[in-house]
Image: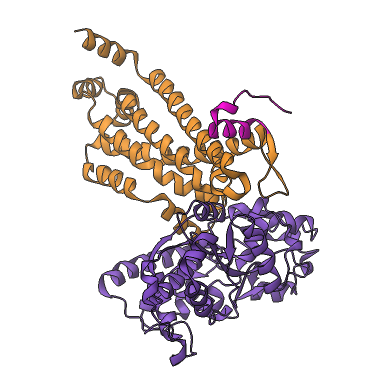
Amino acid sequence: MSVELPVAFLGAFGDAFEFIFNQSESPLGGTEVGGLQQVGELTWDHIKVSAAALAAGLAVALPLGLYLGHRGRGELFAVAAGNAGRAIPELVLIALMVAFIGTGFLNVTIALAILAVPPVLTNTFVGVSQVDRTAVEAARGMGMSERQIALRVELPLAAPTIMTGVRTGAVNVVATATIAPLGGVLTLGDFILSPNVYGDAGVLAGAILVALLAVAVELGLAGVQWLVTPTGLKLQRASAETA
Amino acid sequence: MSFEKALPGGQAWFRALRRSPSPWLRGLFALVAALVLAVGVAACGDDDDDDGGDDTGGDESALIESNPDNEAVELTIGSKNFDEQFILGEIYAQALEAAGYSVNTELNLGSEVIAKRALEEGEVDAYPEYTSTTLTSLYEVAPEDVPGDATAAYEMANAELQTDGLTAFPPTPFTSANAVGLLTETADELGVETISDLEGVSQDLTLYGTTECRQRIDCLLGLEANYGLEFKGFRPVDPELRYEVLDNGDADLSILFTTDGQLYTDPGTYAILEDDQQLLPAGNVIVTASQEAVDEAGEDFGATIEKVQENLTLEVMQELNARVSLDREDPADVAADYLKASGYIQ
């Protein structure tokens, strides 16, 4: 399959798009690289490991943030964990994981999940603890259990703030999954980490693809954020803006 | 210093823990290592009194003499982006400085393609390259056509380089090659000595290599096509972790370099399979320079380069690599130690 692209005038970017759409011989010879099939495979691999890591990160950070936020305790922990997590260099984390636990999908997933935890944890904590106290008191007065209050009142009302954290975490994960090939998992990062095999065009193509994927994820989750925001909150905001 | 050395009471139990099959014990190791590192970094300076590169000792005639005529010549020495290259870059740079040149360094240029471009654009005047890499990567010579003899490979590479206005100096004594490595234990168990011996067992073995290995003819592709081997799987890994994956049992086979420091510090732990079909080309280091720089710098340039690499045998290179890659010493210090121990500088 070959697609003719009128991209020659784009220079290096043209070469990168050419690489994405059409297979060509590796600058080192011996194999064909690029093309939609290879790009598709690596994109799918990239999405798989990112999704697993985000899911794992959410599974840890959401309940923890919700619990701490609901109890109104552990602010120091939630915020410190969030800040410390942001300071960990991911390359070192992957290297440590590989050295002491091993390589492969599970380990890279855990390493990337650690990156998703801080923004989700901090935002969940802040979101939940800032829910209008009168709403919580009303729920309590209606006889809801603490668990019901957390899940049915605080979680929905904190949803927009939580989703902001999820978006940050997801973009972190997608961008950082670029170095997953160093830990035994192929992703779009392979294009960037194997410059002699893919050539300059492949490296640039890899960078473009990762950037596009990160933007797509960000936009997709912005859509989800809009969907999970309770109608009441949207109306409140709209009236606040017009007022 | 290395954190293994910082621990009281020897290293054997420590290494056993690091290589333990149980993830819990290895986790414990990680924790201990992190603690020791934190304490060690705070507590001790560089107290390692390893002596320099080798034992040939300082002989008077080896000393590089500074020539005042060279002072006006400014040279920029480059290197690619891994430890062995940093060391070599420093060795040549410091030696040239001792010969009186005004030397700058530009160590960390990236791959050979980038290094060559830097050379052609005059950003660097010389950098160390491997004959095999020059031929296969820069001039698209098939791996099986790379001469096994160092001099022949050098002459072939030099002829190619001169078509681009570049020139190379004669090769180092040591040869560097990619190699299929494994734990000696595993090799004995499987009864393999050559890569061809893997036939019939390779389908149960997982091979680790750099990200590029997967699609390189002088790596996975060639092992599959030329040797006809099929592996249980191939996994890419950070080049720094090629021994770790063998140690922790993830990898059965790992693509190693023959000059790796680990082969010096842990003799007998790792075995290298003989490349009986000459798929993985071996290369000696040749300092590659622009012809312009060579003409301008005069004859001390080449003479100094050839002189200081005389003691760079495989064992010495492995030891220097071990000090930088494993003990985290500064490449500049390690290079200076080598030059002093060989009597090239005082």
B44 or B306, nearer to the observer: B306
Asked if B224 appears above or below B96 in the picture, the reply is above
Region in magenta: A1-22
The answer to whether any part of residue B207 appears in the image is no
Q: Is residue A108 left or right of residue A71?
A: right
Magenta segment: does it hold B67? no
User: Residue at 56% across / 76% down in the picture?
Assistant: B263
Q: Is residue A69 above or below residue B301?
A: above
Q: Colour of chain B?
A: purple
* Residue A58 appears left or right of B238: left
- In which quadrant of the rendered image does the N terminus of chain B lie? bottom left
Q: Residue at x 46, y 66 (%)?
A: B86
Rendering coords of residue B268 (x, y %): 60, 80
Of B114 and B296, nearer the camera is B296
Q: Is residue B4 left or right of residue B212?
A: left
Q: Position of residue A204 (x, y in %)?
A: 53, 38
- Taking depth in this image into account, of A134 and A99 the one nearest to the observer is A99
Q: Quadrant of residue B166?
A: bottom right
- Where residue A59 appears, as percent x and y from the top left, is 43, 39
In this view of the protein, which residue sits in the foreground, B98 or B230?
Answer: B98
- Residue A7 can be seen, yes or no: yes
Q: Is residue A50 left or right of residue A147?
A: right
The chain painted orange is A
